[in-house]
Image: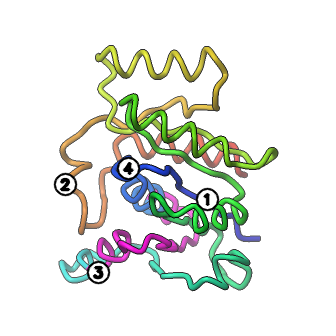
Amino acid sequence: MTKTIVFVNAKGGTGKTTSTICIATALAGMREVAVWDADPQGSATDWAEQAADAGQPLPFNVEIPNEVRMKHGPRHTTADYVLIDTPPGHPKVIDEAIAAADFVILPSSPAVIDLDRMLATAASIPAGVPHAALITRANKQTVAYKTAVTFLRDNSVIPVFSNAIGDRQAIQNSFGSRPDIFYDYSAVTDELLEVME
């Protein structure tokens, strides 16, 4: 049966698309994967097209789901996992994606404004839907990172992945290519599989 992983944060620029593509690529080495690009900006679609044009096609299809498909979720697919990249600031799309989710990932940098929007988004997730925050653009030596993780973990505000995504230039520059070095995304994918399988 297909499992759906949804990436949400009401704020843009938090690493939703990058996390979607990198985790999908890591999963594609072990499972059949599809990505749904539910963001009208089409960043995941652009990524896939640029990678294909560069002779580095992604190891999965990136599809743009229509409204009916979003509402009903991935029913008729052979993929083991469907990962959905959602837009910022589109509550209807976010809610439909969450309704189809087996797991929700909430990417956020340690910046206070990103965490604030992530927590507001998390509050809209219905009880019983597994979810966790994924700290992106993390410099583990900074006060901002340490404060964010301590706040989230100590106050049991929201579950948090044990691994964070480092603030690496290579990750930021990976758009339009097939990720071949996953850095911290491999460890996050392992954590995800432990929960989902």
How far across and down, in percent of the image, does residue 161 sit? 55, 34
Q: Nearer the viewer, mark 1 or mark 4?
A: 4
Q: Residue at x 66, y 67 (%)?
A: 96
Query: What stretch of residues is rendered in magenta?
Result: 26-49
How far across and down, in percent of the image, does residue 179 sit? 31, 59
Task: Answer whether labels 1 and 3 touch (C-beta < 8 Å).
Answer: no
- Please tell me which residue lies in front, 180 or 126: 126
Residue underneath mark 4: 15
Amino acid on which disc 3 is placed: Glu
How far across and down, in percent of the image, does residue 181 sit? 30, 51
Is 170 placed above or below 18 here? above
Residue underneath mark 3: 49
- Locate the N terminus by quadrant: bottom right
Dot placed on the residue nearer the N-terminal end, 1 or 3: 1
Amino acid on which disc 4 is placed: Gly
Residue underneath mark 2: 173
Helix, strand or loop for disc 4: loop
How far across and down, in percent of the image, does residue 73 sit? 69, 75
Dot placed on the residue nearer the N-terminal end, 1 or 4: 1
Helix, strand or loop for disc 1: strand
- Please tell me which residue lies in front, 120 or 29: 120
Helix, strand or loop for disc 3: helix
Dot placed on the residue nearer the N-terminal end, 2 or 1: 1
Is 53 placed above or below 27 here? below
Task: Answer whether labels 4 and 3 touch (C-beta < 8 Å).
Answer: no
Answer with the quarter of the image where residue 31 lies. Answer: bottom right
Amino acid on which disc 1 is placed: Ile
Categorize mark 3 by other alpha carbons within 10 Å: few (<14), some (14-19), many (20+): some
Distance, label 2 to label 4, CA atoms, is 12 Å
Task: Answer whether labels 2 and 3 touch (C-beta < 8 Å).
Answer: no
On residue 5, the disc is: 1
Answer with the quarter of the image where residue 144 lies. Answer: top left
